[in-house]
Image (cartoon, coloured by chain):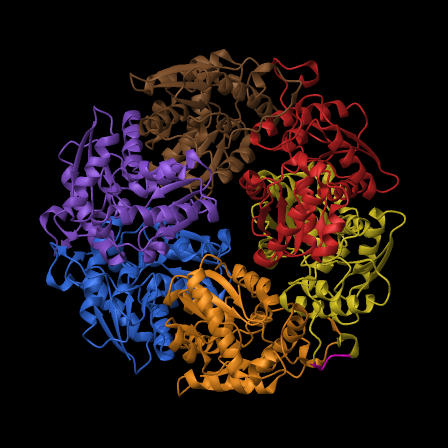
Chain colours: A purple, B blue, C orange, D yellow, E red, F brown
């Protein structure tokens, strides 16, 4: 089985971390290919970034169509461009936020999201609402550490997440925590050891989910929401984005 | 007052219709500028189109920042890229779907959306849910006429909408109808005459809403969700999209 | 365009303030007529007051039918008697609470209501739920200053609202604030200056909303919920309330 | 135990029917007093009627305060003025719609309302939503027989209700039916015999509910929503409505 | 009228307390029979206990079918096995939690549950959601006193409940409190005296509710959800549980 | 990896089918052990059956604790006793309904449940609501074929499901179908071929979900809802159910 994991931002460092996290939990026979798109922002921290990054994610799924992939993972916690990507492929496409929420639902009754930037709170709540999981997600707890700082100062990142996680457990009744960012290698295990609740690395969750879906032979439903995009004139975009 | 109306697709015919509809209802002293972006699909019929079109909409708002606009309207019924555009400007940014829903709420208790393509049903429901209006929107009724055919065969378009509108009224209890497409010049009045309920042209609704907001001097809240985008490296996009 | 603004309580001082607020934001060509009813309580602070005041509001809409008004505003933050008034007129009828909520929805994702009396909290929540906006309204924050004291001690009123507003922003994530009372002239601007988020005077919002609706030529849907009242015997009420 | 049942409309015929229904199911030791107010519409068929009738209901609760009643029932299916009446009394006040919904919840999972006029559909849905029971109420099924015709042509009324009830059961999955009108003496039993599901006369339900509440010695909570009305100047209303 | 109250746990002490509470509020002519099942846990503190106790409750309802009961009460605040018991009998079956919630709805707008163990919080929230009352229940406040300790140290129990009740009122806006446990004899009155809001003993509420239902002659709807169990082979259970 | 699949009913035929379905999709290295409990009903068709079957399921999880299992699957579409079983084990416990719903969420926007008996409709809706997925599940479509008849007449079963599935797709907008019964070997593939949407065998979904969870090393959260059952006196149950 061959899975393409698309980090929708252009930070190749983060792509490497995502790849490492994915391979750590993938089954030996699963081939993981990790990419970041040619175009897009170096991190995704607002709606503006998200749109630009979605284009890159779509481009990578399109390229993937001729590369024999069995499934795709969108590896940004906003599930950037997920529905558009799902239209492009017949193979399943899984978002890492979505996957982590769904796995959390099987491990406890209420989960919380540990997000990085507080301005993302509404976007996270919106995402959860879009998936219909608002009664399962008890809170979005935010640290205020910039995305790239997470890479630089792992200790500070971990401390901020520990603090947010404790509040989620004690004040919001969280039973499971979803790490709201890709590329937080091994942080799930470290937090889990201290907080004594399951802590989900969304990349790991997405890998396990898509392995299961592919094993079972299921593909995206093409009957309405995710029909292939209609072929038409598209101006000002490179050939790789023409249908 | 100077308003920039952005048709996020690249059909200049539709941009002209949107402009005509907007000017028909704008106050005499309101200056309407209508554009379609340089880049993007010629119509917006799926999530894929929507992402590509959102980039164009963002680009046009960015350009507008130095052109002295008092407000922006995103003139596609998916409110394409609305939240990203709202981050870019201090001036208010209104989506035509949003505006039509909110106006409908003041004219009757339940409204329906008359949408064109049935594959858009879920996207429409999602949009309504994102705005929190699911208890006010009683149905999304779809015709199955392609977007560009609406331009070509006005008679067929009108008949399809009349049929969908009647079902919305009789079977779903709709009291107000929102036309789910931009550029349907005068169709609101024609349908209203036959169906005896308010029929809202979303472009008209958006023009009236933003005129009111600008008159009152209100601007987008910049405290959390719609903070300006964070400045960062963005690869593979033209200068017009760099922050 | 000629708009009748009905202050459903019998405080002529408040009616004057409402008129001043309305004229401050109305367009020059909009003619504003402000009235308080002959019958009703001097302030509206509970459900009992609200019923008595609704009768007065209805009476004023009825009178208005022969006075050539293009629209009506119910200028009490409980939207007192709004649905009954909507039945009476063909012209649009807008409640100030409703108008402020809907405008808030276009300026930020989450809004809070700054209400005066804490016993009104449930009534406010109920109002929001009736409009289906519970996912957009993040909190109702109450001061405990009596309605008429607001008139007397503007400084104390402002301080109480500032405190409540700050809590709404910091603890509840409010991005826009709706002032939950009519007649708070200029308070919106003063609070906005200090709190750095849009603060909406509901009278101003209602004026802008109804100007837009009238401009666009839309009227209340008469197909079901807001059909005209059925003519029948009504005992014990003056002629002005007979149908 | 002495209960005052207030028929908020001024039809003394209906008041008599309500009294008969109430006495039929009241316990022998329960004293039932039935009144219609001096002021108000002869039937309640729209929001306009409802406001006028609420005043009458309030007046009757106020009178009751010195007449030694242990509880009050508002006997109109819109629960007209219920919250205002609850403010007035320390003794419990029960609405017949509310009581029928709550009893239905103990007899089956989903209930439907059999309402008379189709224009009441939204008002009924709003009432159910206000009580938070939208997931238990599967439909509001309407006949289109005018309220007073129900009195005149019992056969026609019954047939219309049978038809609506059957649809509720077969198409909406209703397991219990709430008769959406007061004064439908014995109709509950007749419909129940034919439809084979519990059919609730709302007056009967309210009598049983309030008997239970009074027996248990419970009174309305006065801590916030239903605090007594604030004493103040009230213009244009008779002495019986002054606080 | 003859009512069987089933304490689903096997603590005969608690059964005695439940009986005392029930008789305290039952009408003189109501015959109360209180039992605990032969099989089951001595207290119900988790889902595991709940399943085992549900079997006992079912067994007691089955026995009751030949003993001439007019109704059944499931006297554990989890409403253990309620829906299964409702399938067995034609006579009404009421859960004490359900009854207390529904009575609370008529006494105030928002109620809170005072529960014992904090691990029950989710189960309580789930119960409330199952009944569709999530918008009426403002919080589940937990003490952390073990169920059997409530019997032993009444003073400590009362203090813990007072503290939880105060928080529910002051922080969550509760207007009515439901005691989340059976067998708390007289505690409702004591708490009510100090907290100044209605405090509901769920056993008392259930007795009043079922007396009302039986008086009115209503029975469980047998049309779908609560049809009698299908007769079939059942292995490993005693004769008393065979259908 | 060693997984215990518990068919909570006592039909060994069905247990065999479940085992076959599970092994068909399990990875080669996954060891599947399938059991039915010693005690319980031969099929699960009502709430009564469900309680009796839950005891058996719990017993089998308890036994499993000393048998070295890495995870448990509850293989009845009501997820019988799931929360109680989750309390018992540290290893993950997955219900087949839950697993099928969550997988459906990644393959399309709206799913429908194809259930067997129409009396199960409410129970299914309740299950979906308990998981918080009501906005994703567009309908529960029921055939009226008895559970054991499914085994006997595969052709009739398939036709009934095809018909229900078609309605779900055409009338309710379902994009994915969840088969609402265990032991329907190969039916997923046959239906999928004809209906052109993903059809999920819940046993297959559960196997893939739990393989993923175990691979990732996650276990049930023990911090609140699913803490181990409290040890206590349990009467009338065999030793295998004592804690």
**In the image shown, does A198 or B102 lie closer to the viewer?**
A198
Q: Residue at x 21, y 40 (%)?
A: A18
> Bounds of the magenta span?
D233-238
Q: Is residue F242 above or below residue F132?
A: above
Q: Is residue E158 above or below residue B214?
A: above
**In the image shown, does F232 or A219 lie closer to the viewer?**
F232
Q: Is residue D146 visible?
A: yes
Residue A129, image x and y in percent?
40, 49
| D235 drawn magenta | yes
Q: Is residue A130 visible?
A: no
Magenta stretch: dominant SS?
A: loop
Q: Is residue D189 above or below residue F39?
A: below
Residue D38 located left or right of residue B220:
right
Q: Residue at x 48, y 27 (%)?
A: F77
Dividing the picture into quarters, in which one does residue B212 lie? bottom left
Residue F154, image x and y in percent?
44, 17
Q: Residue at x 55, y 33 (%)?
A: F123
Residue F40, image x and y in percent?
58, 17
């Amino acid at each position: 089985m061959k899975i393409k994991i698309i980090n929708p931002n252009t930070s190749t460092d983060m792509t490497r971390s995502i790849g490492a996290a994915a391979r750590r939990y993938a089954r030996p026979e699963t081939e993981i290919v990790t990419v970041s798109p040619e175009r897009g922002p170096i991190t995704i921290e607002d709606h503006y970034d998200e749109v630009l990054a979605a284009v890159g994610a779509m481009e990578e799924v399109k390229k993937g169509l001729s590369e024999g992939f069995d499934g795709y993972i969108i590896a940004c916690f906003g599930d950037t461009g997920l529905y558009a990507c799902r239209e492009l492929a017949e193979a399943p496409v899984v978002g890492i936020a979505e996957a982590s929420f769904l796995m959390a639902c099987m491990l406890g009754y209420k989960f919380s999201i540990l997000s990085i930037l507080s301005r993302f709170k509404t976007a996270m709540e919106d995402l959860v609402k879009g998936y219909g999981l608002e009664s399962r997600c008890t809170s979005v707890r935010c640290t205020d550490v910039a995305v790239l700082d997470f890479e630089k100062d792992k200790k500070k990142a971990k401390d901020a997440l520990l603090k947010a996680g404790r509040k989620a457990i004690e004040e919001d009744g969280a039973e499971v925590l979803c790490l709201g960012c890709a590329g937080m290698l091994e942080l799930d295990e470290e937090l889990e050891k201290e907080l004594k609740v399951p802590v989900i690395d969304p990349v790991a969750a997405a890998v396990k989910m898509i392995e299961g879906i592919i094993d079972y032979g299921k593909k995206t439903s093409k009957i309405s929401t995710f029909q292939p995009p209609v072929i038409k004139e598209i101006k000002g975009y490179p050939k790789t984005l023409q249908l």
